[in-house]
Image: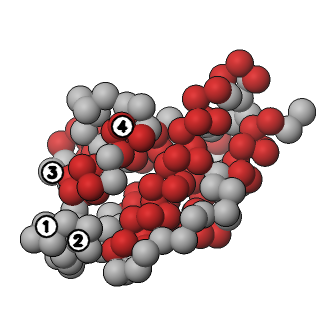
Amino acid sequence: MKEFRSVRNQFLSDHFQDSYANSNSILLSFTRPTTQVDPILWLPMTCSERSRVLRWRLGWLPGGKPKECILHPGHNWSRRHVYECLSVHDRLYLPRSIEDPISFLLNLLPLHKLRPTDHHNWVVQWPILCTILHELDYYFHDECPPPPEDPGAELLSWLFEQ
């Protein structure tokens, strides 16, 4: 049985790596380059935060149909427009050379508890990322977003538990 699992896991890993390397899929190119369970499925966060993160990961946020940005009439929502419209690179303190800063950070989410010395980036960037996705969700639905209540607090609490 162990040999079967080993062979199966190797097959799945090889198939994923081939698909990842040879795919024209934009969504696949923004996922983690491994076959492990994505931590966005198990890290502590509110239902709304997880929903927004998953919808971003699946390409559902902003939605699939072209829709005009309420902040910039004449421009449709797209990932590229989100970065400019909501100043994502500047707000997350990331260089513009990173093509998709939101997916970049999601790919860096911890796979296990971090050492206390490794928390400092998440303390700043995770609440900002949650706020950006919160704003995008509301703007895409033609609503003005209310201030989010303590964005990212559940993940930060988990990181700082002793």
**Which residue is at the far top?**
117
Residue 153 position, x and y percent, is 71, 51
Residue 77 at x, y = what percent? 22, 67
Q: Position of residue 27 (x, y in %)?
A: 29, 55
- The single residue placed furthest to the right in the displayed view is 162
Label 2: few (<14), some (14–19) or many (≥20) C-alpha neighbours in 10 Å: some
Give the spatial CA distance, label 3 vs label 1. 25 Å
Q: Would you place residue 60 above or below residue 2 in this image?
A: below
- Spatial CA distance of label 2 from label 4 is 20 Å
Q: Name which residue lies at 34% across and 39% down.
A: 89
Report the Cα–Cα distance between label 4 and label 1: 20 Å
Q: Amino acid at mark 2?
A: Cys
Q: Secondary structure at mark 4?
A: helix
- Point out the tag, 2 or 3, that comes first from the N-terminus: 3
Q: Which amino acid lies under the numbered mark 1 shown in the image of this protein? A: His
Left or right side of 96 for 24: left
> The disc labelled 4 sits on which kind of residue?
Asp
The numbered mark at residue 69 is: 2
From the image, tell me which residue sits under label 4. Answer: 90
Does 72 appear above or below 81? below
Q: Nearer the viewer, residue 127 or 105?
A: 127
**Residue at position x 50%, y 35% in the image:** 108
Q: Could you say which is closer to the camera, residue 68 or residue 116?
A: 68
Most extreme residue toward the left, as rendered? 74
Secondary structure under tag 1 reads: loop
- Which residue is labeled 3 in the image? 24
* Amino acid type, residue under disc 3 in the picture: Asn
- Residue at mark 1: 75
Q: Is residue 119 left or right of residue 84?
A: right
Which callout, 4 or 3, points at the residue further toward the start of the chain? 3
Cβ atoms under marks 2 and 1 closer than 8 Å? yes
Q: Earlier in the sequence, mark 2 or mark 4?
A: 2
